[in-house]
Amino acid sequence: MKNIFKNIRSTRLKIFISTVFVLLLVGCVFLDTVSITQTQDDGTQAASAKAGTTATFSVTGHINCIEDHGDVQFIFSFLAPKSWNVRKNAKVTYKTTLHTNPDEELNMSVVPESTLPKNGGGRSWGEALIQDYGVGPNVLSDMEWVTFATDAKWAIFNGDKPIYTIYIRTNVGDQNLKAYLGFFINHTDDGMSTSLDHKKVKFSDTPFEVVGGKGLMIDYSSEHFNKVQPLSVLQDDYVTFSFNGGVFQNDLISSQEIYFEGKAYDENGVVIAEVNEKSSKTLLKKETQYNRIYSLTMWPASYFTVPEGKVIKRIEYVFTNNDRSVIITQSDDDFAVKGTVLVGEKRSFAFEFLCD
Amino acid sequence: MKSKTLIVTTILLICTFFNSCDTFKDNEFSNNIESIKNLDGVWQLKTVSRNGIDITNTMDFSQFRLNLNIDGSYTLENYLPFAVKKDGKWRVDDPQYPFHLIFRENNSTTDVTIGLKYPIVAGKRIISISLSPGCHSNTYIYEFEKK
């Protein structure tokens, strides 16, 4: 009996020691801070940039290495609106105390979609990141993770404790917008394994804003009554307009049927067509039984019967019920989101067709 | 006695193992010729994805037909956004290993080439086409099934 207890104790001890050993082996990479502020014209710092300019974001972190790695590349991924085209426009560099000159900025290059992470289960870096972390605190999904790897391969040894800073310099596009940005670090030896110790993710504490550009402000960062997907479209795309009835108190959500009413304008502001019939064409469908989102997907050129030679530039729309006794507009959204009290007539939602 | 039985059983198992594999000569493989992929026919649009998300159930896509006629002409029925807008001529880049479908609209002098896959799904040949008829940042995958 005594021996049995002794064996159990020794087995538990072995498991404990092994666990501690494994924990000691890992715990390698840390992402400490991210900075998204930019110097403004008046010299102050703010999380915003003018449209069309280049913004610089930075990430600092450290590594507590308790195992040896040879020929390893460090990975950095950046979540940003698709309209920024980070893959093409961003220049990513880093400094590290692993290097003989810790002040030298070294290059990182885009990882092609065909180069898969070692433990990503056959998914590309972009697919794995969007599945594991989504778009973080953002509510619009028109964003992408773009992954970069250090051009240099590094040898890092048990006991090394380097620090690093990564710089992302990228054009913020022409579209006015507001979005949380995402930052992710990992390395090629780990390659998106299930362990949390070799990878870290962080989202900006506040949304980053692009101002003074084209179109209406697209807010990726907070819930609204309306949602349009995708955000960069032309009239020959399929565009989904959604009414999110569960996000703020409203009377329309209790209606049996919710309809879309829209007006399409050309680039001169002339109305091309107005569709306000109440039929299957304009009826929104409930997305799932688990939420209160109703959507309508259309091919705009056909939906608004756009004549040859005309091009839709803007759509103004509202959501309503069968007898139009309840209408949800931009003014209702402004009141719900910002508490803006309605003055004068209600304003429709507006969506501009842009493609950069 | 026991050990004799064991030896005999082992020898029998080894013989079975080595004889279970058929033998092929190299030249038998070289006689295999990849068949020509028969893509002509009436193709009905079955599924549509937008930027990797299936949107098939969000509107009625099923009426769109791509008629790839055996004489090399094509027609489009119940038009939806596609790589070409008018009827015309079609061909593939390689009849045995087609990776691209090439269209030329009537009265046009330029080709429109789109990527093509032709897997068999649930016992049926499908063709899968990737295209961006609207904004270049949006990619659609159309999957057609033969009628």
Image (cartoon, coloured by chain):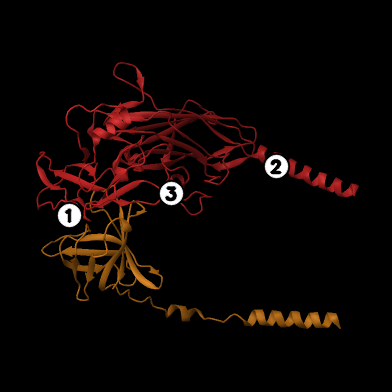
Chain colours: A red, B orange
Q: Which mark is residue A19?
A: 2
**Residue A286 at what x, y percent from top left?**
33, 51
Quadrant occupied by the C terminus of chain A? top left
Amino acid type at circle 3 is Glu
Is label 1 or label 2 in front?
1
Residue pictured at 26% horizontal, 61% vertical: B61
Is B22 situated left or right of A139 in this image? Answer: right
Amino acid type at circle 2 is Thr
Residue that carries the numbered disc 3 in the rendered image: A127
The local crowd at label 1, few if under 14, some if 14 to 19, many if 20 or more residues have their Cα within 10 Å, is: some
Q: Are marks 2 and 3 in contact (CB under 8 Å)?
A: no
Q: Between residues A284 and A140, which one lies in front from this camera angle?
A: A284
Provide the secondary structure element on which disc 3 rests: helix
Vertical side of B1 occupied by A355: above or below: above
Amino acid type at circle 1 is Ser
Q: State whether discs 1 and 2 lie on one chain.
A: yes
> What's the CA distance linking mark 2 and mark 3?
31 Å
Q: Which mark is residue A145?
A: none
Q: Are marks 1 and 2 in contact (CB under 8 Å)?
A: no
Is B124 situated left or right of A9 in this image? Answer: left
First in sequence, mark 3 or 1: give its number: 3
Provide the secondary structure element on which disc 1 rests: helix
**Residue A202 at what x, y percent from top left?**
47, 34
Provide the secondary structure element on which disc 2 rests: helix
Q: Which mark is residue A302?
A: 1
